[in-house]
Image: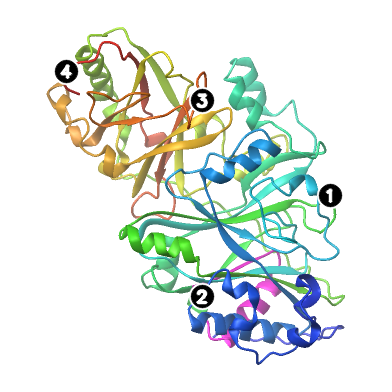
């Protein structure tokens, strides 16, 4: 049982009308039915969880905390138009698995920059997808977890920071010296709509994913309640945990995400960091049930802030990223990957077709959120970490085009078959707009190298061969990319994501992952069967 803590506050409870403009009389009616809260109609929770929201809110308001409720919305490819208009590019969305994005009301004394209003989406009035975090604040999420899927994870990122470009950043210097792709380099070290701030989109620690939830609760992580507290202080975390328990939440179902003040800049003024919180949910076992969860998003998010003069100085420590492991060293398959590349080119009668390599973003770009924030090495960053997650290993291809009849063969090891991933996706991305336009998951990749088994020393199921073109006529295992998705003359890049190494809580060790390759083929001369 969690120890209860009693704290004297210098201010009486602060009603919900603080931010939402709801009448004081209505906000003080603690016995009101859940339907009295208009935001409960945006994301409909099961009745018992909505009651938990109401009881929790009443309890913490009675202890001097202000409570302001936000909402959740899907964020997908159709929302990329907003950051493209505002920033010039999107964020590498998953085109078949939209994220769930938290949207919250600002505090009355919180700095709000209208230049960021459409930086992610078009929020409701007096709401924003980005927020600053007061040292006396916690975000509390009360959730009905989705139906079973390959992956679920919830995470907070530092979105932007008031800081100047650092030309001496090690990665920047290495990319300049290597004459690295300027399209990607401009994104990694780009600014924001506020010239004094840099884009970061950087993780601050490990995400809370379905494996973490199962390990802590000892139960299935699907179709059940869970509670998440995002805060910077140990005492605040305890206060929120106790209040959730008083409202009926089991202690084992409560998860704390530390936002350490030793890593981030807290506060509500212009100079403070701003944040985003979002959920990734991919490949539900029952597609219809998963889509129903996405449509309803049975999630509540509350901003809870101590309005007294109490100081919170028991900072949560900077999280330590969980060490990555792998179940199989895929580099042992490198020779076979070379044989597969040759076999594909020969089958097309194009033995000299150009090969474009992928690289490990984790290794080559040091795509690790805390590093992008300048921790522990203050000479690193600021760098856009592209929404990094310790749950996945990322490989990124070089650039190519498909406007002159090219057919792109993507050839790689399939980590769901080698035992290094529970979920693998291969996405086609429009650059430099950084829009994910097509996605091929491991179910579609599985078995696609079977026709080349005679060239391989290992089982063909350990590999995949998939084609991308404007026109897939005569090709199996092929996806078409229309000019509506990537305009004529547009550049494309591929990103491979390997989520959660089985037996661990995070993505596989990139040192034991075999990077795929692209083969640029002349689509005017196609083999009869592929």
Q: Residue at x 64, y 36 (%)?
A: 84
Residue 230 located within the stretch drawn in magenta = yes
Of callouts 2 and 1, which one flags the residue occurring earlier in the amino acid sequence?
Answer: 2
Between the residue at mark 3 and the residue at mark 1, the CA separation in whole angstroms equals: 39 Å
Between the residue at mark 3 and the residue at mark 2, the CA separation in whole angstroms equals: 41 Å
Image vertical order of residue 329 relative to residue 277, above or below: above
Disc 3 vs disc 4: which is toward the camera? 3
Numbered circle sitting on residue 45: 2
What residue would you read off at disc 4? 528
Numbered circle sitting on residue 487: 3
Residue 406 shows in the view: yes
Between the residue at mark 2 and the residue at mark 1, the CA separation in whole angstroms equals: 36 Å
Numbered circle sitting on residue 271: 1
Between the residue at mark 1 and the residue at mark 4, the CA separation in whole angstroms equals: 62 Å
Between the residue at mark 3 and the residue at mark 4, the CA separation in whole angstroms equals: 29 Å
Q: Residue at x 39, y 71 (%)?
A: 223
Q: From the top left corner, tell me how far across and down residue 373 is, in percent.
A: 68, 43
Q: Residue at x 45, y 68 (%)?
A: 145
């Amino acid at each position: 049982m969690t120890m209860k803590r009693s704290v004297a506050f210098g201010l009486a409870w602060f009603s919900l009308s603080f931010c939402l403009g709801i009448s004081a009389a209505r906000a003080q009616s603690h016995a009101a039915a859940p339907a009295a809260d208009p935001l409960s109609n945006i994301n409909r929770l099961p009745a018992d969880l909505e009651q938990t929201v109401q009881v929790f809110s009443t309890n913490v308001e009675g202890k001097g905390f202000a409570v302001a409720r936000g909402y959740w919305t899907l964020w997908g490819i159709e929302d990329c138009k907003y950051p493209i208009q505002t920033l010039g590019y999107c964020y590498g969305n998953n085109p078949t698995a939209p994220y769930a994005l938290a949207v919250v009301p600002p505090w009355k004394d919180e700095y709000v920059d209208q230049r960021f209003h459409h930086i992610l989406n078009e929020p409701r009035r007096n709401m924003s997808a980005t927020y600053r975090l007061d040292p006396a604040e916690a975000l509390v999420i009360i959730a009905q977890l989705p139906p079973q899927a390959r992956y679920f994870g919830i995470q907070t990122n530092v979105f932007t920071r008031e800081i100047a470009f650092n030309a001496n950043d090690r990665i920047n210097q290495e990319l300049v010296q290597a004459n690295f792709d300027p399209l990607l380099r401009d994104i990694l070290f780009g600014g924001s709509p506020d010239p004094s701030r840099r884009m970061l989109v950087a993780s601050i620690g490990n995400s809370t994913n379905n494996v973490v939830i199962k390990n802590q609760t000892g139960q299935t992580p699907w179709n059940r309640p869970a509670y998440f507290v995002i805060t910077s202080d140990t005492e605040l975390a305890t206060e929120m945990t106790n209040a959730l328990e008083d409202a009926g939440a089991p202690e084992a179902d409560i998860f704390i995400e530390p936002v350490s003040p030793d890593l981030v800049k807290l506060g509500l003024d212009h100079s403070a960091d701003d944040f985003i919180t979002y959920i990734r949910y991919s490949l539900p076992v029952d597609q219809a049930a998963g889509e129903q969860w996405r449509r309803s998003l049975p999630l509540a998010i509350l901003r809870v802030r101590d309005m007294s003069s109490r100081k919170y100085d028991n900072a949560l420590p900077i999280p330590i990223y969980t060490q990555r492991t792998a179940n199989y060293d895929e580099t042992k398959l490198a020779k076979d990957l070379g044989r597969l590349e040759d076999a594909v080119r020969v089958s097309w009668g194009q033995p000299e077709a150009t090969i474009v390599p992928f690289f490990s973003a984790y290794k080559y770009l040091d795509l690790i959120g805390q590093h992008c924030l300048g921790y522990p090495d203050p000479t690193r960053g600021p760098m856009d970490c592209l929404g990094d997650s310790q749950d996945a290993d990322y490989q990124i291809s070089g650039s190519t085009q498909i406007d002159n009849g090219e057919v792109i063969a993507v050839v790689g090891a399939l980590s769901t078959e080698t035992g290094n991933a529970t979920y693998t996706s291969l996405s086609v991305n429009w650059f430099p707009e950084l829009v994910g336009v097509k996605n091929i998951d491991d179910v579609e990749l599985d078995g696609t190298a079977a026709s080349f088994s005679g060239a391989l020393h290992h089982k063909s199921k350990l590999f995949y061969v998939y084609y991308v073109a404007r026109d897939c006529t005569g090709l199996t295992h092929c996806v078409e990319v229309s000019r509506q998705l990537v305009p004529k003359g547009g550049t494309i890049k591929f990103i491979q994501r390997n989520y959660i190494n089985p037996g661990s809580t995070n993505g596989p060790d990139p040192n034991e992952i075999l990077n795929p390759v692209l083969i640029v083929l002349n689509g005017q001369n196609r083999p009869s069967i592929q």
